[in-house]
Image (cartoon, grey):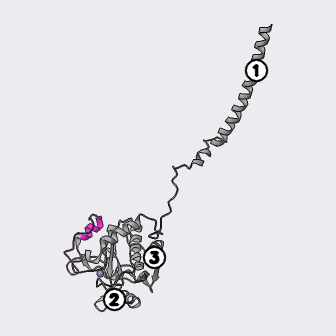
Amino acid sequence: MATPLSAAAVLTALRAEGVRVVEVGSWRTHNRNQKGAWGPVNGSIVHHTVTKGTANTVAMVRDGYADLPGPLCHGMIAKDGQVHLVGWGRANHAGGGDPVVLKQVTNESYGSRPTPPTKGNLNGVDGNAHFYGWECENLGDGKDPWPTAQYDAIVRVQAALCRAHDWTAKSVIGHLEWSSDKVDPRGFTMAQLRTDVAERLTHPANWTPGSSTPTAPKKDTMEPIDVWLYKGKDETSDAYAYLRNTKIKLDAQDKKIDALTKAVAELTDLVKKG
Ligand SMILES: [Zn+2]
């Protein structure tokens, strides 16, 4: 449960996650808040659009249609991976869904997938108050491909929200997991998407998949040279300097001892002769 991010905050979070954002018109204030609650938010829902062509898809999810006024989501994730923000606030995307699923998502208390929903659009609980919504440009026939750039953007958007709210990937579900009368998204599994979001969340927001994450040197690991450079508190010499100076002093003392030994031997001789 969380207060929805502000438009400015989501923009910052998305950009930090490496999402290429397109701001469409007055998206920050385009919403259905006059029709009902927006928040507290409990998660994010992924959809497919059953459309082809980015421009007309953006127009449709922004404006809606006769029976269903827009916005129909918060952002539309296009084939090329660009994310078109069309609204912020309550949006007509989730409709009715299963209260059992809402509880499982809120508590992130399910296994690889939530309990299959038995409630749907007409007899479920209001999802538009509780979820961010992301439409993805796809025909939804199970054959239309999901380009890597688009899928990567879906993962980044969901990870950005999880990161901002300190959620795990279990706060991300598909519309088909929310509502008994929905099938979207088709073409990848939500379990796989959650796995990929979870992986992303183990890296910094600016991580690019396939690149190794630079790891900061551990403070408790000393390189061999550091041992020589070690300096105790209030000491003016490092470890190497101490060792070198000690050797010089020992050599000097050796010479003194040699001289003293020689002097004692000479004195002994004198005593014996005397
Ligand atoms: Zn949907």
Q: Which residues are magenta?
A: 101-120
Is 104 inside the magenta-drawn segment?
yes
The disc at residue 262 is 1
Q: CA distance from mark 1 to mark 3?
A: 84 Å
Residue 7 x/y as whole percent: 43, 76
- Whether the residues at callouts 2 and 3 have beta carbons within 8 Å, the answer is no
Q: Which of 186/102 is in front?
A: 186
Which quarter of the figure is the C terminus placed in?
A: top right
Mark 1 or 3: in front is 1
Inspect the image, locate mark 2, and give the three-letter code of the amino acid beneath it. Answer: Thr
Q: Is residue 1 visible?
A: no
Which quarter of the figure is the N terminus placed in?
A: bottom left
Judging by the rendered image, the residue that carries numbered circle 3 is: 19
Q: Earlier in the sequence, mark 1 or mark 3?
A: 3
Judging by the rendered image, the residue that carries numbered circle 2 is: 51
Picture residue at 69% right of the left edge, 37% below the top: 245
Tell which quarter ligand 1 is in. bottom left
- Whether the residues at callouts 2 and 1 have beta carbons within 8 Å, the answer is no
